[in-house]
Amino acid sequence: MTSDAAALTTHGETHDATEHGAAGLGNPVLGMLLFITSEVMFFAGLFAAYFSIRASYQELVNGQLVHLWPPAQFADTLKALPFVITTSEGHTVLNVILPATLILIASSFTCQLGVNAIKRDDRTGFLRNFGVTLVLGILFLLLQAYDYTVLFGEGMGLGSTTFGTTYFTLTGFHGAHVFGGALMLAVVVYRGMAGQFSARHHDMVEATSLYWHFVDIVWILLFSVLYLLPGVKA
Amino acid sequence: MATTALHPAAPAVRGGLYEWLTTTDHKKIGMLYLVNSLVFFALGGILALVVRLELAQPGMQFIDEAFYNQAFTMHASFMLFLFIIPILAGFGNYAVPLQIGAPDMAFPRINALSFWLLPLGGALMASGFLASGGAAASGWTEYPPLSGPAYHGTGTDLWIMGLVLIGTSSILGAINFLVTIFRMRAPGMTLFRMPILSWTVLVTSVLVLMSTPVLTSALIMLFIDRNYGGHFFDPANGGNAVLYQNVFWFYSHPAVYIMVLPAMGIISEVLPVFSRKPLFGYKAFVFATVGIGALGFSVWAHHMFTTGQVFLPFFALMTFLIAVPTGVKMFNWIATLWRGKLVFSTPLLFAFGFLTMFLIGGLNGAFSAAVPVDFALHDTYWVVAHLHYVLFGGSVFGVFAGIYYWFPKMTGRMLNETLGKLQFVLMFVGFNMTFFPMHQLGLMGMPRRIADYASTAGWTELNTLATIGGFTIGLSMVPFLWNVMVSLRNGRIAGDDPWEGNTLEWATSSPPPPYNFDHLPEIRSERPVFDARHGRTATH
Amino acid sequence: MSLPPRSRASSGPLIAGTLIVVVIGIAIVALLAAGITPQRAWESFFPVGGQPVVTDRAHATRSLYDVVFYIAAAIFLLVEGLIIFTAIRYRRKPGDEELPPQIHGNNLIEIIWTVIPLGIVLFLFVISWQTLNTVDAKAATGDVHVRAVAARFQWKFDYLDGPDGPNAKVVYEQLLPVGDDGGLVLPVGSPVHITLTSPDVIHAFYVPKFLFKRDVVPGKLNNFDFTVDTPGTYRGQCAELCGEFHGSMLFEVHALPQADFDAWMAAAVKKAQQSPPPPPSGAPAGSGAPAPSGAPAGSGAPAGQAVQEAAHNIAFVNQNLSAPANTPFAIEFDNQDAGQPHNIEIKDAGGAVKFKGDLVIGPAKATYDVPALPAGTYPFVCTVHSNMTGTITVQ
Ligand code: HEA
Ligand code: HEA
Ligand code: CUA
Ligand SMILES: [Cu+2]
């Protein structure tokens, strides 16, 4: 994106038709904000599906159809969420989701520190903070992978009732977005090491940080909905 | 006008194939959009003729029921996703940077990507015909459970994947349009001096941005249900079949305005130029466009009145309300023509086709807003009549108005007027012959999406008539294609401004140079080129 | 700056308009020649071609339709008239180079043409809401409770002993959706309660003369009430795409006077008690519908003479059968298609129906007792799927 904009600036210099004020958002930043808007709508679709399915889930309990959530077969495993998981053998395992959440929130802060640094023309500060953000992001993904293996071990999957379907779809797509954000971070760090950003020229840095904040906010919503929202008992 | 008179008419097609394949010039990309969309129009049209041929008489004569379902599903998918949405985006691509005085789109390479996703997605979708079990066949709406794994094979997966790519193309395109419009307008080009086409593209882009990702989410959930054992829409396992419809129409109702707003924009360019008056009520027009866009998000369930699962009065009210801003537009158009001096070139003829036919489509849509009436009309041929009157009578007539209007700018040569008028008459007559009887068929109770009907049902004559009409529309394409081929080489040289246009694209050469303008006229109203031609005194 | 001369001829609309008028004229003449009177043409703009509608709710809907139609027609004539008027009145005269008055707008008139349509649509909204309340109202009385089961591609009507629910019992199961001894049989003049369920995909219950349809959504129990007010047979059809044979998912409604209906119902219940209907397995799973069970229709055919036939993937497995002449024989029919209704109908060379078996919803078996046939070859067919055919040679 940046190079596209750069190409335009060059033409702008030769064609007087394109003299625009330098004030306001840069094209890549505006483009990113719009892209995030579309991503918000994408997740809105998934969330809407989750709530609708959650609200209409029914199960036979003592011969009566009743509404509950999560489904009875997972209620034990997920009893003390978000802090522990009880496996079928009766072990309790520390649920990694809460640490993962804290890590992701922290990474949003380091990311913002990086942006602030580059605005001061502090390139080392920027690189250090973005490096930390990237590492935290990868850590989050690893923890999520661990969470999946525990749940898979419990026999849960995309097909385990609508609970499994919604849980893995929502967290899976969020994970994919974290992965995409991590790639963008990596590119920014790489280009930053090559000295491409400065206090005057850092649209790409800002755009990436916006995306990272968005991914973080989606996770906070997901975490609240999947783990904190009280379940419905029979 | 002193600005661009120095440019000689440049040859229509510059550069070789390689240049076209790798171009990032918004004008070339716009023309690629147009050509690609017309190819899919032909494919979708041929499928429509297959449908019409089978329905002409009771009994199964040419194809079987399974292929019939594929035929109308792919007909609609091609027409909507690969013809009408992209071709309007193509006009936007071509005209918006020119109209706002920008050298190109904000992200030229993303622009090229948006385009190339389309043939790719289209090919994926169409390859369903080669898959075992055939192409997608649950209607363009692909309602589960019918579109689920139990009933349909690979063709449906290909349809989903193709549509996700096409949706991505739309989203990237919308971001590009918005950044271009917000950030790259020429000095003096305030938002309220922007040509209406650019305004409609702006509103359309917002609709795309807000609704298309929701479609993507629906498609992905369907894909998970089909391939990874998910249960989103699977009632046998606690899923909710109607949920899909809610999510789908949350996209697809705004989408019908994505399919018509830019065509309304084209009409709003053509009518002032050929009546030689300014657009009547420019601001009201802008507000009406925004209003349609906003209301468009609150009416989706009018496609689901008969599901018994939606809150009827709310959606009925919002659906009725949307007639008001549309009416404002209609009246503004008529007021633009009023006391004008109409020059009946082909673009204006097609614009009249739009006005007269879209009116019918709008009004017969309003019947369905009256919920009990919709109980009777839903899923009958009445709805088929409605959707073709708005989409063909509205959008397609608008598209052809646009083609005749900008062809001189794109190629430097005029299209032949006689052939254009011949095409118009054939198309107008064929269109009404095909789709008007569908009102009657719907009222008589003929359901849509049926491959066959009883000879005793009393529907035969009107179906035969519709089939003849369908082929007449097909015939109207012969003078069109002939016209384009001949005029590309031998058409009259157009000059910069053959129509005495109002907007900035007429201030540069035909075709325009790579970065569009050497000099821009001063922009002090929504008609800068008109102002430059007549001096400021004539404007007020 | 001066105007460049305009070279375009202005004859465009004249030619195009004349051609269009000529074509419309020809169309009118053709219609008249085909025997379509103005009367019939006018009626074709109303539901069911102007024929009377037959339920209490349908009359309300029809009145609403008429209001909407007349308002829409008036708007159409006015606006279309204005458009055509501008095309005729405001054409540029050749050689006229002067600009018309450059009017940019008028706020008052914008307000007028916003407010008037707003008033019209609000009015339309209010009357549709009122009509909706009539159409969707639940009938307080009436003891005819029918559960319509829509499965690909066949309708079945279960007559219940009371309101549908987990405890409702099926007193009679109407397997044949069309024909003299099939269809949805209803009394005239007393309210009917219909519930809808589907074991597979979405279908829709649609009777044109009821001006009504309602989707059959698997996993949801939709219901509606109405009273038929005219005896007769009315065509019904599935109105939601449900697969290849969506178009042949037909049914009939037989509306009988109350006394006739009571007699029919009594006979039907008796018949059901004597010989329970064939097991419609694969049928209703949704909404707690108790799957009615029962042994296959009694065989009683002489042993050793049974003819074997099976249906698989919407086709007969044996397309050529043979049977003894002039003696009754049995066909053991095995429907292997889950959820699919099939049967066997035997015709003679002249097309007269010699035998028609009850529908079996697969996977299930049935034994058909065929009466004695004279020697010859007879085509047979599944009445649901006209493309399922075969021949039986009787010798
Ligand atoms: C370009 C596309 C387009 C457009 C613009 C519209 C416009 C409208 N549509 Fe349409 N619609 C479709 C495309 C479109 N539609 C498609 C594709 C389907 C079928 C989908 C499928 O199932 O496959 C459909 C189906 C559809 C349904 C569902 C029918 C059913 O399945 O039962 C309904 C129901 O309310 C509806 C309503 C409307 C209304 C009220 C408008 C309004 O916006 C129209 C407003 C315009 C006017 C009313 C005319 C001008 C106004 C005046 C002159 C002012 C005075 C008028 C009054 C006071 C009434 N449409
Ligand atoms: C922009 C949208 C668009 C357009 C332009 C059309 C155009 C046409 N449509 Fe389409 N149609 C839809 C959108 C559209 N349709 C939708 C959304 C549905 C609902 C589908 C569903 O239920 O899921 C539908 C459904 C639909 C049905 C109902 C099917 C059913 O319910 O069973 C029918 C039946 O007649 C039909 C017919 C036609 C015809 C005859 C044309 C003609 O106007 C086509 C004319 C075009 C051509 C003929 C192509 C031009 C040809 C060339 C350039 C090459 C020359 C080639 C030859 C002449 C052979 N359409
Ligand atoms: Cu059942 Cu269509
Ligand atoms: Cu809609």
Image (cartoon, coloured by chain):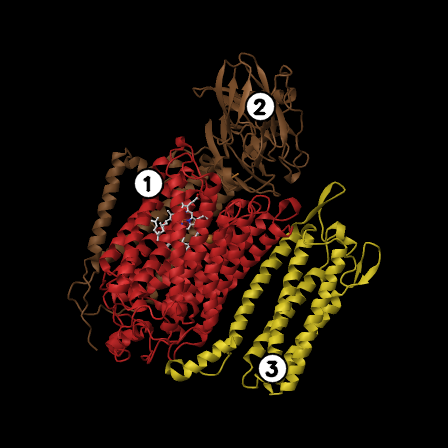
Amino acid type of the residue that numbered disc 2 sits on in the rendered structure: Met
The residue singled out by tag 2 in the image is C265
Query: Chain B's shade in the image?
Result: red
The x and y percentages for residue A163 are: 69, 53
The residue singled out by tag 3 in the image is A192
Q: Secondary structure at mark 2?
A: helix
Q: Which chain is mark 2 on?
A: C
The x and y percentages for residue B107 are: 47, 73
Tell me which residue sits at (49%, 20%) in the image: C378
Is B270 drawn above or below residue B512 in the view shown? above
Amino acid type of the residue that numbered disc 1 sits on in the rendered structure: Leu
3 vs 2, front mark: 3
Whether labels 1 and 2 share one chain:
no
Q: Which chain is brown?
A: C
Tell me which residue sits at (36%, 72%) in the image: B98
Q: Which chain is yellow?
A: A
Q: Which of the two residues, B504 or A205, is positioned nearer the viewer here? A: A205
Question: From mark 1 to mark 2, how far is it between C-alphas?
Answer: 45 Å
The residue singled out by tag 1 in the image is B465
Q: Quadrant of the N terminus of chain C?
A: bottom left
Q: Which chain is mark 1 on?
A: B
The x and y percentages for residue A7 are: 46, 79
> Is residue B316 rendered to the left or right of residue B45?
right
Q: Which of the two residues, B204 or B426, is positioned nearer the viewer here? A: B426
